[in-house]
């Protein structure tokens, strides 16, 4: 049981990283990034090639993950979402656009990398003994890196100037504009950070889960579940959602065989929605 | 104005003749071509349900789930209990609508992105249900060799004869009949009072509520109809394919149903039909690039949103608007 809880905590921390990315983009631009899972998948491939194949340093590979995905995110925002948000009369438009980008990334990955499942060797060897649980040192490292990234992100959003501009943008777009904030630049930055969070999570999890071109949809669905559980657009909600899902998955896979776990999670989510549609941390909305 | 209406009816009749008479006559021996149109008809039928949920202002990415429910209902009823297909078809729709209503009560309270997210999860959840109920659905290996429809007899008189092997024309007309039925039904609904209520719901729940409209009830009605159509479409699809797997309707399929609506234009009843026929048809024509199908679909989605966010049918509309703008000028000159 201790083993399950420790595993759940590690998974939860990484899931929180994924959920933070999608909730960041959602709160700033009001766009649901369907391509989040695909960005995660690309991050996994970056680490696979740089660290697994070309034997770069793991942390340099992670840095490249952040950089490459940030560029992709910024590109999407500048050339696709900005225009659609401006011309569209319906909010569905940006959603279909996001689905289009998701399918595009997945298809590009499928064509260039094939369907093969790949893995990378663990970053550090050895096992750490906590209470009654044994944790491979590699996983402990993931936990550590993910928590540092989350803390760094929270500090960035809370105390820096662009971070404050992002929070303002999430609250009220027009008021932010009146304060002289360059909305386009902040949106682009937000999208880039959101994308790079997905990418770095993919890079980190490459050493636990297989890397393959079809892994994106499942991650997108997981991140939707997380922000539904926690409450969309709320930073604390994303973290809570990540930990709840990580723990539920860990306990479920530990005790119940096969894919029934996710079925139960889906049922629980629908029940939760019936009782509390705005999620655990979300504010009530009309 | 009247003239444009007549010309529109004329065009519609032209397409109907092409669809019901000319095409099947010309290709009556080419099962391949008939198959493409059968698929397009069934897909546009299923997408019409999605269109109805758009009409009440909900983004539905869960139609694949209800098509799968309909398909499995038909498969299980015909295989295990030997029920006739003609009874299964409406039963599948009713089953899908029932489950849709049950799930709809909690989730229809959600709006916009939230509803989209939960319906997307629903597609995945239903796949998992069918994967895990192996006694009934045979899990991942799916149900194969589903019997083709038998004869529909009523009081000793055969109304619809039994299917004969290799006779695709049979399914062609079956699919066409279902599509026309759904189209006419939705058109009637759309111009009736309920249609106006649905559009009021799309504009503002609060406003509709203040006018004394039972918002929850009409939302459920719309979603129930949507699921009913999805279930019937899934049922017909399953029987025409003769098999069904948990992965027959995936998340991408649910997204495509939505895409068909967008491609044709959300403001038009014929939008999903136009979208489904265009995409299915063009990709069967370009079999060479099948490998890149998803990629090309994706580029199309992005391009559509960037340059034509209101769909293909809006092109025609734009033309007419510009003509109308021209007319007054001409009058002034005259």
Image (cartoon, grey):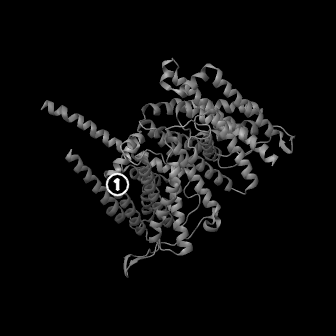
| Residue B125 vertical position relative to residue A285 in the rendered view, above or below | below
| Residue A286 vertical position relative to residue A148 in the rendered view, above or below | below
Q: Residue at x 53, y 39 (%)?
A: A98
Q: Quadrant of residue A149?
A: top right
Q: Give the chain letter at badge 1.
A: B
Give B18 or B325, whichever is nearer the viewer.
B325
Give A111 or B164, whichever is nearer the viewer.
B164
Q: Is residue B96 visible?
A: yes
Badge 1 local density, few (<14 within 10 Å), some, or many (20+)? some
Q: For this view, does B96 lie left or right of residue A19?
A: left
Give B115 or A43, whichever is nearer the viewer.
B115
Picture coordinates of residue B227, whole percent (x, y) = 47, 56
| Residue B12 vertical position relative to residue B317 in the rendered view, above or below | below
Q: Secondary structure at mark 1?
A: helix
Q: Residue at x 20, y 36 (%)?
A: B327
Task: In the displayed orientation, state which residue is furthest to the top.
Answer: A180
Q: How many marks?
A: 1
Picture coordinates of residue A175, whole percent (x, y) = 49, 22
Picture coordinates of residue B235, whole percent (x, y) = 49, 64
Q: Is residue B62 visible?
A: no
Task: In the displayed orientation, state which residue is furthest to the bottom.
Answer: B156
| Residue A185 vertical position relative to residue A274 in the rendered view, above or below | above
Q: Which residue is mark 1?
A: B189
Q: Residue at x 56, y 32 (%)?
A: A27
Give A265 or B312, whichever is nearer the viewer.
A265
Q: For this view, does B65 lie left or right of residue B56?
A: right
């Amino acid at each position: 049981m201790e083993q399950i809880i420790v595993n759940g905590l590690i998974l939860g921390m990484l899931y929180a990283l994924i959920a933070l990315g999608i909730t960041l983009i959602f709160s700033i631009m009001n766009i649901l990034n369907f391509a989040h899972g695909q960005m995660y998948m690309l991050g996994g491939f970056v680490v696979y090639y740089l660290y697994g194949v070309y034997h770069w340093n793991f942390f340099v590979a992670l840095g490249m993950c952040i950089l490459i995905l940030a560029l992709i995110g910024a590109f999407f925002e500048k050339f696709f979402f900005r225009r659609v948000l401006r011309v569209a009369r319906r909010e569905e438009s940006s959603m279909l656009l996001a689905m289009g980008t998701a399918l595009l990334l997945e298809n590009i990955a499928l064509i260039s990398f094939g369907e093969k499942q790949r893995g990378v060797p663990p970053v550090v060897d050895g096992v750490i003994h906590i209470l009654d649980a044994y944790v491979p040192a590699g996983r402990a490292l993931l936990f550590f890196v993910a928590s540092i990234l989350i803390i760094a992100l929270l500090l960035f959003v809370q105390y820096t100037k662009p971070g404050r501009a992002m929070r303002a943008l999430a609250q009220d777009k027009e008021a932010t504009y009146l304060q002289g904030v360059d909305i386009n630049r902040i949106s682009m930055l937000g999208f880039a950070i959101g994308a790079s969070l997905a990418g770095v999570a993919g890079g980190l999890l490459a050493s636990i889960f297989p890397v393959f071109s079809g892994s994106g949809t499942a991650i997108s669905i997981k991140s939707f579940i997380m922000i539904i559980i926690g409450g969309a657009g709320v930073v604390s909600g994303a973290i809570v959602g990540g930990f709840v899902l990580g723990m539920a998955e860990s306990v479920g896979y530990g005790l119940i065989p096969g894919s029934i776990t996710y079925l139960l999670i889906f049922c629980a989510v629908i029940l939760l929605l019936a009782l509390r549609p705005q999620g655990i941390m979300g504010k009530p909305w009309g | 104005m009247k003239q444009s209406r007549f010309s529109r009816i004329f065009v519609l009749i032209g397409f109907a003749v092409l669809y019901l008479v000319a095409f099947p006559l010309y290709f009556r021996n080419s099962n391949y071509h008939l198959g493409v149109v059968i698929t397009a008809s069934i897909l546009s039928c299923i997408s019409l349900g999605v269109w109805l949920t758009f009409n009440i202002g909900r983004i539905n990415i869960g139609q694949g789930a209800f098509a799968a429910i309909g398909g499995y209902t038909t498969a299980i009823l015909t295989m295990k209990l030997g029920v006739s297909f003609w009874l299964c078809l409406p039963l599948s729709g009713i089953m899908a609508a029932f489950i849709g209503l049950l799930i709809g009560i909690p989730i229809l309270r959600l709006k916009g992105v939230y509803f989209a997210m939960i319906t997307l999860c629903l597609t995945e959840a239903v796949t998992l249900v069918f994967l895990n109920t192996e006694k009934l659905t045979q899990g991942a290996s799916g149900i194969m060799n589903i019997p083709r429809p038998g004869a529909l007899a009523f009081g000793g008189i055969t109304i619809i004869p039994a299917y004969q092997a290799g006779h695709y024309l049979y399914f062609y007309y079956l699919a066409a009949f279902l599509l026309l039925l759904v189209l006419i039904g939705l058109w009637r609904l759309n111009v009736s009072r309920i249609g106006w209520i649905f559009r009021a719901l799309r504009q503002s729940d609060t406003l509709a509520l203040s006018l004394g409209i039972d918002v929850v009830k009409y939302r459920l009605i719309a979603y129930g109809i949507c699921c009913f159509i999805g279930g019937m479409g899934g049922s017909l699809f399953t029987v025409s394919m003769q098999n069904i797997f948990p992965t027959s309707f995936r998340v991408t399929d649910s997204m495509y149903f939505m895409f068909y609506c967008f491609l044709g234009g959300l403001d038009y009843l014929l939008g999903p039909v136009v979208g489904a026929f265009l995409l299915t048809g063009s990709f069967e024509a370009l079999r060479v690039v099948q490998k890149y199908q998803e990629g090309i679909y994706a580029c199309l989605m992005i391009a559509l949103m960037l340059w034509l966010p209101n769909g293909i049918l809006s092109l025609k509309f734009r033309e007419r608007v510009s003509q109308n703008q021209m007319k007054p000028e001409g009058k002034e000159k005259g």
